[in-house]
Amino acid sequence: QVPLVESGGGSVQVGGSLTLSCTSKYGVGVRANFMGWSRQVLGKERRGVARIDLDGRTWYADSVKGRFTIFHNNTDNSLYLQMNSLKPEDTAMYYCVSDFTPYGNRWVGGYWGQGIQVPVSP
């Protein structure tokens, strides 16, 4: 297991920005064929919002396109999610995920962080 640790969450107002960071607990970094960020809204299933592969190709859920940017630091193998123009519907628990198999926005297997809360207030 390579436990993943998210940071950077916290309350933000509508229209604001926030950057989430992810690294591995044991310092080995986050590096896999697929790396990404998933989120879970209260009462709903987890869904992927952004992923990146080792070649730097990215995928975004329609709901966040143009507002969220995922990037990977190849030096220290940290993973980031830059979130701009946040909306109330972005309020969710956000999870860093590594080495999963994507089926659209449903991700199977891999390593998951414990999650970090991002509340977006009016």
Image: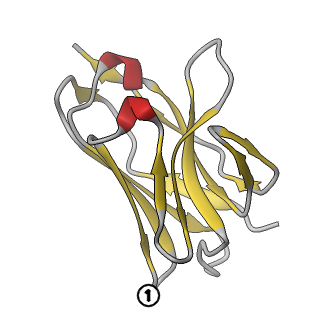
Secondary element type, mark 1: loop
In-front residue for pair 11/54: 54
88 to the left or right of 58? left
How would you rate the neighbour count of disc 1 (Cα within 10 Å): few for under 14, some for 14-19, many for 20 or more? few
> In which quadrant is the N terminus drawn?
bottom right
Does residue 67 sit above or below 72 in this rendering?
above
- x then y, percent, for residue 66: 27, 42
- x then y, percent, for residue 106: 70, 37
User: What residue is shown at x 58% (from left), y 15% (from top)?
Assistant: 42
- x then y, percent, for residue 58: 46, 59
Q: How is the image coloured?
A: secondary structure
In-front residue for pair 90/7: 90
Does residue 15 sit above or below 37 in this rendering?
above
User: What residue is shown at x 56% (from left), y 55% (from top)?
Assistant: 36
Does residue 91 sit above or below 24 in this rendering?
above
The amino acid on which the numbered mark 1 sits, given as a three-letter code, is Thr
Residue at numbered disc 1: 75
